[in-house]
Amino acid sequence: MSTPTTLRIDFVSDVSCPWCAVGLGALEQALGRVAPDIRAELHFQPFELNPHMAPEGQDSIEHLTEKYGISEEQVRANGEHLRRRGATVGFDFDLGRRKRVWNTFDAHRLLHWAEEVDLAKQHALKKALFKAYFSDGLSPSDHDLLVRLAGEAGLDTQRAAEILASDEFAAETREREHMYTGAGIHSVPAIIFNNQHLISGGQPAELFERALRQIAGAAPRDTQEA
């Protein structure tokens, strides 16, 4: 039996980015197809689409028409396209419930902490945040929600509440954000394999599968755990 190859994958994204939810679903499908020969050490990295969003948020239709210079009809058509793409990767978009766009920095602080605790729990928290926002229409800036989702992901809720009540991990999260934007990443999702290979956007699972096989085939097996 051959030794599995483990790839490090840094998934740079925002929890309010719909194409990030699509991209993650497609990546997960691809990883399922290449298992058990190829495994992933998946790290979720911060990116804010709207870093200056006010605490009260903004109406989602208003925000999208202003930001992209499109009509309300185009916003709704784009939403339907997203809904169909989401369905292909098992993600349920209910954009009618997503009434507002919110600041996501506290969610990123919690994800930074979760990465230090357990990568599987960080993954679970990330998926829960996508569902809360895009399927349930809840605010990723709501501390009570964030604590609840942390607990559902298997994380310590008391510790999560302590972090959110302070500025803990704020500097580290900002530093990580600046590292990726300084490297030229200005749109998400940006998926980086072994710190070398970049795939941008909510690509189909077939593209991720080909990339995983090519990168794994070219990488020395005895260095994958680094």
Image (cartoon, grey):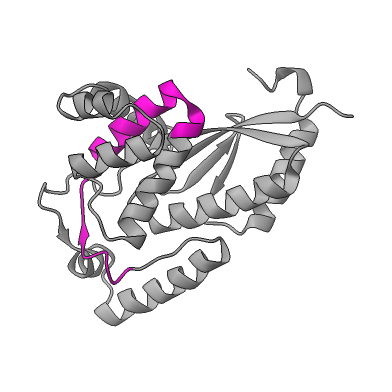
- Residue 29: image location, x then y, percent: 63, 52
Residue 66: tell me if it is visible.
yes
Residue at horizontal 15%, vertical 59%? Answer: 58
> From the viewer's perspective, is residue 110 above or below residue 54?
above
Quadrant placement of the N terminus? top right
Q: Quadrant of residue 213?
A: top right
Q: Quadrant of residue 217?
A: top right
Is residue 166 located in the magenta-colored stretch of the structure? no
- Residue 148: image location, x then y, percent: 28, 40
- Residue 73: image location, x then y, percent: 30, 82
> From the viewer's perspective, is residue 58 above or below residue 39?
below
> From the viewer's perspective, is residue 210 above or below residue 76?
above
Is residue 119 located in the magenta-colored stretch of the structure? yes
Magenta-highlighted residues: 95-121
- Residue 78: image location, x then y, percent: 39, 73
Quadrant placement of the C terminus? top right
Q: Is residue 10 left or right of residue 204?
A: left
Residue at horizontal 38%, vertical 51%? Answer: 130
Residue at horizontal 61%, vertical 59%? Answer: 204
> From the viewer's perspective, is residue 19 above or below residue 104?
below
Residue at horizontal 41%, vertical 76%? Answer: 80
- Relative to the observer, which residue lies in front, 18 or 174? 18
Q: Is residue 30 left or right of residue 140?
A: right
Q: Quadrant of residue 197?
A: top right
